[in-house]
Image (tube, helix red, strand yellow):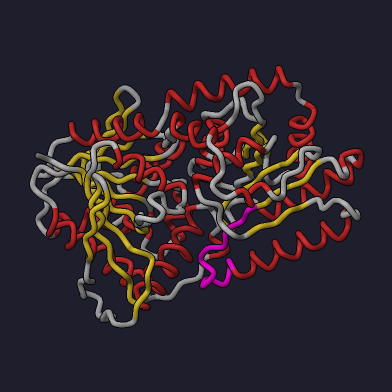
Amino acid sequence: MSKLIVLSNRVNLPNKQSPKAVAGGLAIALQEALAKDGGIWVGWNGQVVTNISDMPDTVNRFVTEQYDKVTYVTTAFSSMQYEKYYCGYANNRLWAGMHDRTDLIVSSSEDFSVYQAVNRMFAKQLQQIAQPDDMIWIQDYHFLAVARHCRDLGMKQRIGFFLHIPFPQLWVWDFLTYGQTLIHQLLDYDVVGLQTQQDAQNCAAVLEQLLPHAIQITQTNGRTLISHGNHTTLIQAYPIGINPVYIHKLASQPLSDQSVLKNLTSTITTILAVERLDYTKGIPERLQAFAAFLQRYPQYLERIQLYQIACPSRLDIQTYQQLRQQVHTLVEQINSQFATASWQPIIYQEDPVSHDNLMPLFRQCQICWVNSLKDGMNLVAKEYIAAQDEQNAGILILSKNAGAAHQLQQAILVDPNSNDSMIEGLYQALTMTKQQREKRHQSLLRGIYETDIDTWRAHFLADLTHMDKTP
């Protein structure tokens, strides 16, 4: 019987004390996708150790653990793999470039070779555990080259790839070191899934521009098929979703940690912002717009507060260290400028909130503000909508640059690069009537149910199933 094998860079192992580990949007989505029918989840366990050889072709030691229906197969990274693959090429180069921040790209000449070596190492592990009829589903920018290495090893299984972040235009791939090589390697996948139609169009356009004589493009029923030699790759948008029934259930339950609500006051409207501390999330821009709002509308002093949860990540990378300092400085300045004896405009927190506690917190906050400068989808926006009480729904302020904005048109859409747009969006949210809020919420909720996590998983795997196996 065939099984599903998922490869993602980071695997958050559940444990007996906390079956639902604290994780990001990608990890939570994959947990939901695998929970239904089970399968194998392969990836990095988050540990960096010194007793792994840094030789490029070393195969790391993998550990297998079983939880419910899912088998977890994980490994630690060596210090070189962490520095040059994860921090170096994957995040200092690919993450920055694919979010159009080529100005932040910093990496060494060795980073790409280690990126390829890590992709090859995971391909070898997949070869060891995959049966001929299994389907392999590779996740995100860390593993653009895995299919090529799988094919070089003689693997003929159907292999799909899903990119959770934006697919950039040609100029970015031209700028990236070895960007064109990665585009060639992408064609060894049977299905390449993107978050939005725009991402799918960008992907097809880049392939056509880089390989005009080596590929044949066929467009049928909104599907793009790329023929390359004797292999065909489907390029298609599959907007990732959530499990709205489960989210709503979580939001309805009592908090296991009541301290999460310690910053909320019934007499003050709370604007919640929760994300990783990342330059793509528009955190400084939001803070500056919030300060400008208080200056423009002083009647809201002591009536609203911004509850900013920003969980630090990638602090081994200088850009993230600088961002953290910038955010700290802005919070201090704004609180110093506007705070009174009984009120602080910004509550800033870096400690993560577990998923089980975050959903009830969503329900308690009247406004959620997602301000991404560029984002593949952003599942926080969808989770906030699903968590609401239908009789007293909150309002979503959503960046027009988030992939979710294509589906969540009834949110208050703002330009994260425009102070005026953000200020007026916040004012609109604060002055909206209960009837207006409920009408918007009903429309948003319907869309979330129509494109939930099961739909995402089913549509992608159905297309992968129907692709011809590699000869």
Q: Is residue 278 something one can see in this rendering?
A: no
Query: Residue 258 or 30: which is nearer the viewer?
Result: 258
Left or right for 82, reference 130:
right
Q: Which residues are magenta?
A: 309-320
The residue drawn where x is 23% and y is 65% is 63
**Going by the image, does 308 lie left or right of 160?**
right
Q: Is residue 316 magenta?
A: yes
Q: Nearer the viewer, residue 315 or 71?
A: 71
Q: Is residue 15 left or right of residue 271?
A: left
Q: Is residue 70 above or below residue 335?
A: above
Instruction: Please say if 166 is above or below 341.
Output: above
From this view, report whether residue 331 is shown above or below residue 31: below
Residue in the image at 54% along x and 53% along y = 100
Query: At 51% across and 73% down in the image, what residue appears?
Result: 316
**Position of residue 159 measured from the top left corner of the image (x, y, whole percent):** 21, 46
Q: Is residue 362 visible?
A: yes
On whether residue 258 falls in the magenta region, the answer is: no
**Percent x, y for residue 396?**
64, 33
In this view, the residue in front, 249 or 39, is: 249
Q: Nearer the viewer, residue 408 or 269?
A: 269
Where is residue 357 shown, x and y percent of the image?
Answer: 54, 46
Tell me which corner region of the image, top left, top right, bottom left or bottom right, holds residue 54: bottom left
Q: Residue at (12%, 40%) from the top-left corner?
A: 2
The N terminus: image quadrant? top left
Question: Looking at the figure, which quarter contains the C terminus?
Answer: top left
Q: How many marks?
A: 0
Locate residue 42: give its quadrant. bottom left
